[in-house]
Amino acid sequence: MAAVLDGKATAVKVKNSVASKVADYIAHGGRVPSLAVILAGENPASQVYVRNKKKDCEEVGIFSSVYVLPSDTSKKELLDLVSFLNSDPETDGILCQLPLPRREDENEVLEAILPDKDVDCFHPYSAGRLFQGNPLMLPCTPAGIIRLLDEYGIQIEGKRCCVVGRSNIVGKPAAMLLLSRSGTVTVCHSRTPDLASHTRSADILVCAVGKAGIITGDMVKPGAAVIDVGMNRGADGKLCGDCDFDSCSGVAEWITPVPGGVGPMTRAMLLENTLTAYRIHEGIV
Ligand code: GUN
């Protein structure tokens, strides 16, 4: 039976570490780090995510401001807000919650965020720096995965890693981070023939597809670490990941639960990135 990689407990450790650094900077007369979150429209999931991000900031002493905008906000208004936040010396991080009501505006708005405030790491410049192995900040979900593996002493160097999913937000950057840690990485996707032949040879299997049950125990190498990034609603209405937990945990050595695995780590890494942005702005090396 696999041991569970406890993202909730590890996220608390990361948050405590961020909180103590923030408290230390403030105790020495520093400015309070701050995160600006843009929430356009009324997507209920986005509203929950943003509420949680605000709560996380409060818990660690980071100031957060949420800019709630109506669904019919124009691209120009969004760009004007980003421009204001870019030039605001009190704002360290800028996060534009996705999806935007007008999906076609997303690239332009994300590309308007200054890279040194890009705490989501979604800007092409940030992706490029990651690609070159010289990132300013790390994309939150992939960084959370690596932090979780490190926490449990799971070695990446020299291991076969299989990432299922090729999104810009998770799959591709997760592959880059595993590669930067000297894993041997295979990226699979919806057009990969015989997916199981790849997943079955992986020591570290990361699944970020968004399809419940796409990975079953027979697709897992005995002794592997299974990292489930999926966040789906099962037929019973309960949250579940991409991996069939019961069958996978019978084969793997390590597995992340959903909820309580990668999700809390993603949230914690946003706080680390905000602190990194603050350090950049304050010239703290
Ligand atoms: N929508 C869903 N997840 C995310 C995220 O991590 N960042 C942003 N900006 N939007 C999201």
Image (cartoon, grey):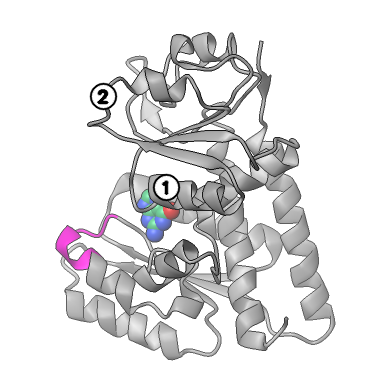
Whether residue 102 is visible to the viewer of this picture, yes or no, is no
Residue 193: image tag: 2
Question: Which residue is at 26% across, 76% downward?
Answer: 78
Q: Which residues are magenta?
A: 99-106
Residue 128 magenta: no
Q: Amino acid at mark 1?
A: Val
The N terminus - image quarter: top right
- The image quadrant that residue 240 belongs to is top left
**Secondary structure of residue under mark 1:** loop
Is 68 left, or right, of 247 in this rendering?
A: left
| Nearest the eye: 164 or 76 | 164
Upstream in sequence: badge 1 or badge 2: 1
Question: Which residue is at 36% across, 60% downward?
Answer: 97
Coordinates of residue 202 in the picture (x, y in percent): 52, 27
Distance (Cα) linking label 1 and label 2: 21 Å
| Nearest the eye: 224 or 67 | 224
Coordinates of residue 105 in the picture (x, y in percent): 19, 67
| Image vertical order of residue 242 relative to residue 21, above or below | above
| Residue at which label 1 appears | 170
- The image quadrant that residue 221 belongs to is top right
Is 273 left, or right, of 130 in this rendering?
A: right
Q: Amino acid at mark 2?
A: Pro
Assess disc 2: are there few (<14), some (14-19) or many (≥20) residues with their C-alpha within 10 Å of its C-alpha.
few
| Nearest the eye: 219 or 236 | 219
Coordinates of residue 206 in the picture (x, y in percent): 48, 34
Is 131 left, or right, of 149 in this rendering?
A: left
